Amino acid sequence: MAAVKTRSELRFILNGRDVAVRDVAPDQTLLDWLRLDRLLKGTKEGCAEGDCGACTVLVGRLAPGGDLTYESVNACIRFMGSLDGCHVVTVEHLAGEGDKLHPVQQAMVDFHGSQCGFCTPGFVMSLYGLWMKSPNPSDAEIEIALQGNLCRCTGYEAIMRAARAVSSYGKAAQDPLLAEREEMKKRLAALRDGARVEIGEGKHRLVVPASADDFAAVLEESPGAVVVAGSTDVGLWVTKHMRDISPAVFIAGLDDLKSISVKDGVVGIGAGVTYTEAFSTLSRHIPALGPLISRIGGEQVRNMGTIGGNIANGSPIGDTPPALIALGAALTLRKGAARRTIPLEEFFIAYGKQDRQPGEFVESVQVPIPAKDEKYAVYKVTKRRDEDITATLGAFRLKLAADGTVETVCIAYGGMAATPKRATAVENALVGKPWTEATVEAAMAKYAEDFTPLTDMRATAEYRALAARNLLLRFYMETSGTKAPLQVSRYEAA
């Protein structure tokens, strides 16, 4: 590989101004930098874990095709190292015509969407991002945009009314972020110099690779470095556990890790693809994954978090690994120029241990699309429906033979063991048997051979065991022609 030029500063645009930052630590968050270095106090710290949305800002980035996309993100867990080549927009940048408030702000005032006011800037920024994408949003779109924003005193109906009314105060097409988009594209393109960013030395080193090839070279040289993609988990290592993540390598801006393809019945997903970026393709080709992705965190988390990071992290309660294991997904790992591909289920060895060599990283995942004669479903159990961490999650793929017996079945769970894990004893109890309630109930007894769940703050072991068994029964009911709906959204009910 040809030598890569380097520079020792992060370059991005803050509101309307170009910024170059040299003195930045690997674990410095955007929230701290905005409040302490730039004295922009509109962005608040509430939870410091990406849960409440008080710190919401917009980050614009040029997509591989050249489009400029703005997304709401949590500044409290977004590291400075991920911002090279971006446009950061805070609530202070909003303005209406003349001396008027911005349409989103005026709507919040007129419809009494603020009480104590602490959460209001975050709500405003989330609604601002929505307004640019959908000037006349449906209630469902508004609620999705606000999944990651918590209000503790006003109540959400006033905010919903404000969201519905924003376009009566102005036209989104005239907003500076849309009206001046072509100029901003040119400014962001000018920041793309193809250089690697290196700031600091030794354990206090921050690296932003120039490309995937450069990333592979950096990781070979520093195999102990912490790789940061979306930082939706690594951010909490810093803000909640006070962990040292130095040296850190930031890969969120690597276009060559953001590919999504569909070929020969397989969806290929680059390790840097976020949940938001993957949603359209996955929900179109594998519909059961759409509702699952929409329940992963709030919109800010989905805009940052990556499927590759969710896999590489190896958490036993990660949402995507069980769903992808049940589909027979494969994982491509890279070290330098060498690549190897393994079944995804073999990647997880034990708690906190994955089949990844020093200097090796997750490059992509290949997800087979279920055949027309296969049935596939994913069920996530949580304390609250939206923006909550999994207690247990079951994924099921089934193919029946012509005589109604189970030809093949693959069942995988999260939250039931030290790793995402298949229920092989249950599968064996089903294969070759008629797909009937009696067969399913007999197979449910085999869960004790596959799993010994733990009790923690999210669920007791007994609850997890019961829920896991019942998810198989639910899958049977949904695939056996029952006419009774097992889940109805409130929009459908209305």
Image (cartoon, helix red, strand yellow):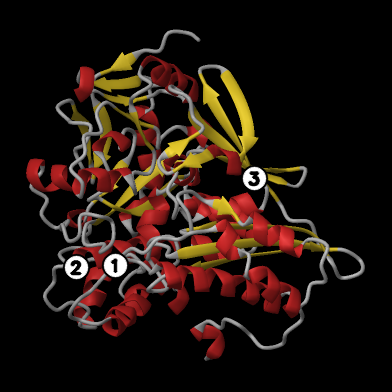
Please report the residue visible at 20 percent of the width from the left and 64 percent of the height from the top: 121
Reading the image, the residue beneath label 3 is 329
Left or right, 363 with reference to 407: left
Q: Nearer the viewer, residue 428 or 7?
A: 428
Q: Earlier in the sequence, mark 1 or mark 2?
A: 2
Q: Amino acid at mark 3?
A: Ala
Q: Amino acid at mark 1?
A: Asn
Q: Residue furthest right?
A: 403
**Contact check, label 1 and label 2, Cβ < 8 Å:** yes
Q: Amino acid at mark 2?
A: Cys
Task: Determine the CA span between mark 1 and mark 2.
Answer: 8 Å
> Is 367 placed above or below 102 here?
above
For discs 2 and 3, the disc positioned in front in the rendered view? 3
Reading the image, the residue beneath label 1 is 149
Left or right, 471 with reference to 104: right
Badge 3: residue crowd in 10 Å (few <14, some 14–19, many ≥20)? many
